[in-house]
Amino acid sequence: MTQNEIREDVEKYVLHTYNRFPIAIDRGEGLYVYDAEGKKYLDFMAGIAVYALGYHFPGYDEALKAQIDKVLHTSNLYYHEPLARAAKAVVESTDLSKVFFTNSGAEAIEGALKAARKYAWLKDKGGDHEIVAMKASFHGRSVGALSVTGNEHYQEPFRPLMGGVHFAEYNNIDSVLQAVNEKTCAIILETVQGEGGVYPADPAFLAGIRSLCDERDILLILDEVQCGMGRTGKMWAYEHYGIKPDIVTCAKALGCGVPVGAFVLNEKTAAASLEAGDHGTTYGGNPFALAAVSEVFKLYEEHDLIGHVNKIAPFLAGKLDELMASKPDKIRAHRGLGLIRGLELDGSISAGEIAARALEEGLLIISAGNNVLRFVPPLIITEKEVLEAIEILDRVI
Ligand SMILES: *Cc1c(COP(=O)(O)O)cnc(C)c1O
C-alpha cells in the first residue's frame, strides 16, 4: 500500500482517538525507522520509551523466533520456562519479592491498586480505603488507572471514576501530608513524571513519602512504566534515591516492543494481598511476551546497557544545555534524569509544532504536556545520533 492509501484506510476504519503524525512507519533498523515511501528518520521517541534496544538488536529477534517455533501461548493455568526466567530476572533486578505479568502499563497499575486495597482490607475488613495520587501524573487510560491520573481533561467525561482518590502536589510533601488520612492505603506516584512534563522526584520528597508510608503502614506504589528499565541510568529509577517501593509497576521497555507489563511486590505486600482467585489475565505473561522479557534482561547485562546510559546521558544533557543557552527566548528549562529528558519551551511555540517540523526534517520526537519536548531515545544511542538530533532541533526551533 502507498503511504496515502494506508493513511486513508486508517482514518476511515480506526476510531479517531489519536492525532497521528502524517507518516506510515514501514520498518526499523537500529536507531532509525523508514516510512512507507522509504524516507529515513532518526528515532528519538522509541515507540514512547519502548524500544530501549532500538530495532533488531542482535539476539532479540532470534529469541522471539525460537519461542514462536515452540509455543506462543499457554494461559496462566500451566507453568512454562519463559515465566520462570522472566520472573527471576524481574524480581532480582527490583530487589523485591514477587511479580505478576500483565499486557500493558495500565493493567500493571490496576493490579497494584488491587493489591493495595486487598492489603488494607485484610487488616480491617473495611471497604473505604483511599489512595493518594499526584497532580499532573499519568498512569494509564483504564478506569482504575485513570482514577489516579491527575489530569482533569482526561478524567472529566468519564466520571464517576473509582472513588476515594485524593490528589497532592508532586514534590510537595506538605501537600501529601494534607491528602493522607487514616483511610489511606496507598500513595502512588511516578519516580520521574513522564507525560506530565518530565519532572524527576526530589530526593527529600521521596524520602519523606517513604517515611510517611512506613510510619502509617501505607503502601508506596512507584510507577516506573516509563522511567524504569535502565532509562535513568539505574535499572529502576528509585535506586537513585536509596529507597524501595512496596510495589513497582513497569511496562514500556520491559519487552522492548512486545506488549508486556508487570507489577512487583515486596515480601510484606506479597504475603498479605492478592491470593489465588483474586486476580488474573488470559494473555498476561504468555510465553512469547516473556521470551522477550528474559532476552531483554540478558542483553542489558551482556552489553552493559546501563553503563552505556551513564556515559551517553551526560553528553545528551550537555548538548541540551547548550541548545537552551543558544535560544534563551525559546527554551525555558531543561530537566531530566539519564535518558528521560525534557526541554520546556516558551509559551510562544508549542512542542507539538516543533515535533511536526522535526518529523519533516527526519527526526521522530514527541511532546509531554503542552510545551515540553520529550527525549526518550533508545538507550543504545551514541554521540553521533545525539549530534544529529541536536542539529535538526537547532534548525527547527
Ligand atoms: C505509558 C504509561 C502508563 C500506561 O501504560 P500503557 O501500556 O499505555 O497502558 C502508565 N504509567 C506511566 C508512567 C506511563 O508512562
Image (cartoon, grey):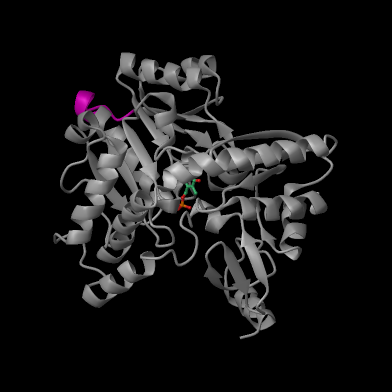
Q: Quadrant of residue 97?
A: top left
Q: Is residue 133 left or right of residue 220?
A: right
Query: In which image quadrant can residue 152 be found?
Result: top right
Relative to 132, is 385 on the left or the right? right
* Quadrant placement of the N terminus: bottom right
Residue 220 visible somewhere in the drawing:
yes
Q: Position of residue 182 (x, y in %)?
A: 36, 17
| Position of residue 270 measured from the top left corner of the image (x, y, whole percent) | 21, 35
Q: Give the answer, above or below, for where 316 lies relative to 70.
A: above
Which residue sits at x=32%, y=43%?
A: 263
Q: Residue 50 at what x, y percent from top left?
A: 48, 55
- Of 317 and 367, nearer the camera is 317
Indicate yes or no whether the magenta region holds residue 170: no
Q: Quadrant of residue 65?
A: bottom left
- At x 68%, y 51%, the residue is 387
Closer to us: 214 or 276: 214
Residue at 40% of width from left, 65% of height from top? 58
Identify the residue at horizontal 29%, vertical 30% (top origin): 127
Q: Residue furthest bottom?
A: 1
Magenta stretch: includes residue 126: yes
Residue 51's spot in the image, x, y percent?
48, 57
Q: Can residue 284 be seen at all in this image of the molecule?
A: no
| 360 or 42, nearer to the observer | 42
**Number of marks in the image?**
0
Boundaries of the magenta span: 121-128
